[in-house]
Image (cartoon, rainbow, N blue to C red):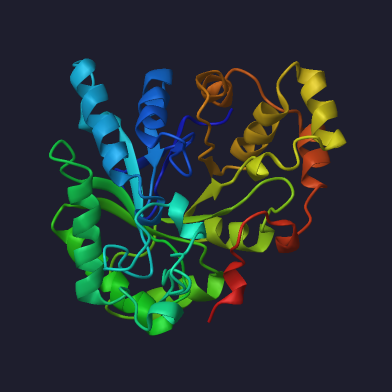
Amino acid sequence: MTSHSYPLPRKPGVQIPAVGFGVFQSADAYASALGALETGYRHLDTAEIYYSEPETGKAVSEFLAANPTLNRADIFICSKLWEVDLSLPGMPPTFESMGHPPPDGSGAWKTTAAKLGRTQYTTPDAIAGFTRSLEKMGPGIEYIDLYLLHNPRPGKQARVDAWLGLQEMEAQGKVRALGVSNWSKRHLEELVADARVTSPPTVNQIEFHPWCQQRELVEYCKQQGIVVVAYSPLAQGTRLGDPVVVEVAEKYGKTVAQVVLKWCLQSNVVIIPKSDNKKRMAQNMDLWGWELAEEDMEKINGLDGGIEARVGEWDPDAWE
């Protein structure tokens, strides 16, 4: 039987809900986050580069105010530090504008360390970046449950330097657990090899779905007590017509999305699907009280196309 939450082995006492809600590219992040909470989600996933931290914090605060039997400890919030400071002048004002550089010919937005010429993956800048994330969520949010370094791109030393800053925030009680996103086995090993790293990553958030299973990385993380969190667990809807999952869905009388998400859960991976539609939000949570048979798990296991089948940008092994 799949669990409703997973303990973080590297952070005793902290549990992460198995089904979260991704606040990414929502048409209305506040409405979507609030709708998810009203539907029953207790795990929200946002990030600095999603430009949805204020809306996420507002949704949590308003939801708790309207539901006095619940408190802040009942909601799990994850956010992430981007590789450059997006509050600098000349940065895109919204996520939607990121794909549309200024029309005055000044070139693309400088949202990578390479384009900007420097990174906020330094110890003081990581502290400042985390502090901005927490402040954006508003006065009702006094801590973040899980905070991630969003990508490995700035390099080995930068990753360590940023991590040391986040460790300070954890020591001050402003964040309960730390993790990473889009990191390879080598990145994780290099980080913990530094003697100054006293609080190792508890989570690695990666693209994971039946068509991109990243098996070696997932197995390594599990062996190390690192919980894998799947972003784009539905492959952004691009492969839900696959005849294998369609056949399995028909067998169980479930939607294809439910079967794909259930496969992720039975693979012991946390999921953070997203939708702006409350009906689909509810369907994406209706994953309890039934199980996929081993033969059907194996059918879906056979769909793996490797990292080349990813729908997003990140190949963790592509970065030094």
Q: What residue appears at the point 55 percent right and 70 percent down from the top-left corner? A: 185
Left or right: 167 in relation to 111:
left
| Location of residue 227 in the rendering, given as x and y in whole percent from the top left corner | 48, 51
Is residue 170 visible from the viewing direction of this image? no
Quadrant in the rendering for residue 83: bottom left
Residue at 68% from the left image edge and 39% from the top image edge: 237
Q: Position of residue 18 (x, y in %)?
A: 48, 36
| Residue 50 shows in this picture | yes
Judge from the rendering whether residue 209 lies leftward or rightward of residue 151; answer left or right: right
**Residue projecting furthest to the front:** 104
Relative to 187, say whether 69 is above or below: above
- Residue 122 position within the rendered picture, expressed as x and y whole percent measured from the top left: 27, 77
**Residue found 18% across the figure and 16% down from its top:** 68
**Number of labelled discs?**
0
**The N terminus sits in image quarter:** top right
- The percent position of residue 296, horizontal first and vertical second, equals 80, 33
Q: Is residue 70 above or below residue 57?
A: above
